[in-house]
Amino acid sequence: MSQHKAKIEWKGGTPDYRLGKYTREHTWTFDGGLAVAASASPSVVPAPWSNPANVDPEEAFVASLSSCHMLTFLHVARLGGFQIESYDDEAVGEMTKNERGVPWISVVTLNPKVVYAGDKRPSPEQEAEMHHKAHDGCFISQSVKTEVKVAGDHQCVMCGSLPTAKGRASMQGQARSNAAKVTMLTLVLSGGLAVGCGGGDGGSPADQFIGRWFYEAPDPTVLGSTGFTLTCTDPIFSTVFPAANMTPFLIFNSLKFEHGELTDLVDTAGICNFLSYDVNGNSATVPNPDPYVDSTTPAPPECFYQFNLSDTAGNPIAALAVIKPTDSWTFQMLPDRTAGGARRAQLVGSAAAHLIADNGTAAGAVSTPDCTYAGKDTFFRLTQP
């Protein structure tokens, strides 16, 4: 048949290469002489070690499927007697995890806008069938197990669910039958470790968060200084944590992220019980509801932090804060590093804080309404796997 070649060149080794501190920028050169600036995706490797202006393998994969489908569709339409004036597509690839927990592009959705010329126009059914034939004849789609969908003005045809023609499988079925041919965007190392394109600090976007993180005090001269505050408006706790004078309140002086079973990450530092996080690029947010809580009704995420208050005589009073993060609660990677080169990140957001204190009664003193815990602190990573 034929061979298709691409030359890949990378130069940029540094003394800190083994620490992951090296550029992922490189060049693709094709047989016609065209050179393309490439890089790892910033969703896998954050700047400055990647360049978001360059093409990354993930989006190139999506573009390859879209381009191949378009070229085959133009051919199919021509054979059908149709005249095409223009064809535009904004394809989208969705990264998920397979059964082994390895990220892969499981679905690519094509969004073609086809403009026809002349008097002959295809019906929605005819156009859907042409897209189906384009998929069947596209070399790239037949080489991968990714599901290909086509959405467009003909209502949104899911190619994987089109009627099966005699002697031919549907797009999804045929693509899955080729699963052994090519698994894109997964590099397998000799030790059996699968890593994402560019190899951030490990095998998936979540791996850049793995390790023990310690917070950087905003004011090093003040022990326990923090960017987080606790404010209350209820009649009991507002005397200690008044809304008019936001009180610095440090809970998360360290975080320890490990891979979760049901979520991307779990903070196992034990300071505030456990909080789970899901990763989206360079940010991690707390899922709601909490998948680890076995309940008949969805349970919001929350963690428990024990601390002490004092009564008017200065005696310690045991207290408990139930921290309930909102959607704004985020742990996000920062582009800069410490002077020594350690990764930095920021915990930012707000949470409802349900306070309970021992006041000698069975029920205890309870904050009604809940207080607010909010702010931001910067962290640096001390250890990694």
Image (cartoon, rainbow, N blue to C red):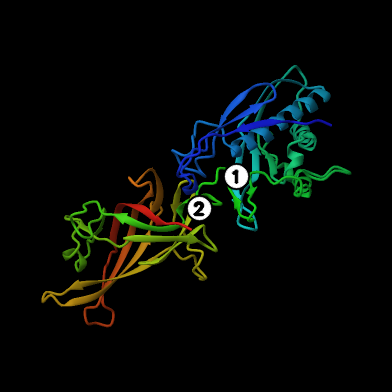
Discs 1, 2 touching: Cβ within 8 Å: no
Residue 249 locus on image (x, y percent): 24, 60
Residue wearing tag 2: 206
Residue wearing tag 1: 94
Give the side of residue 33 with respect to residue 121, left or right: left
Of residues 256 and 234, the one drawn nearer to the viewer in this rendering: 256
Q: Residue furthest top?
A: 118
Q: CA distance from mark 1 to mark 2?
A: 16 Å
Residue 102 locus on image (x, y percent): 61, 53
Q: In percent of the image, x 59 and y 27: which residue is there? A: 36
Q: Residues within 10 Å of mark 1 (few under 14, many from 20)?
A: some
Foreground disc of the pair 1, 2: 2
Residue 194 locus on image (x, y percent): 61, 52
Give the side of residue 7 with respect to residue 215, left or right: right
| Residue 86 drawn above or below residue 125 | above
First in residue order: circle 1 vs circle 2? 1
Q: Residue furthest right?
A: 167
Mark 1 residue element: strand
Tell me where residue 73 sits by quadrant.
Answer: top right
Of residues 56 and 343, the one drawn nearer to the viewer in this rendering: 343
| Residue 86 drawn above or below residue 111 | above
Q: Residues within 10 Å of mark 2 (few under 14, many from 20)?
A: many
Residue 324 locus on image (x, y percent): 37, 62
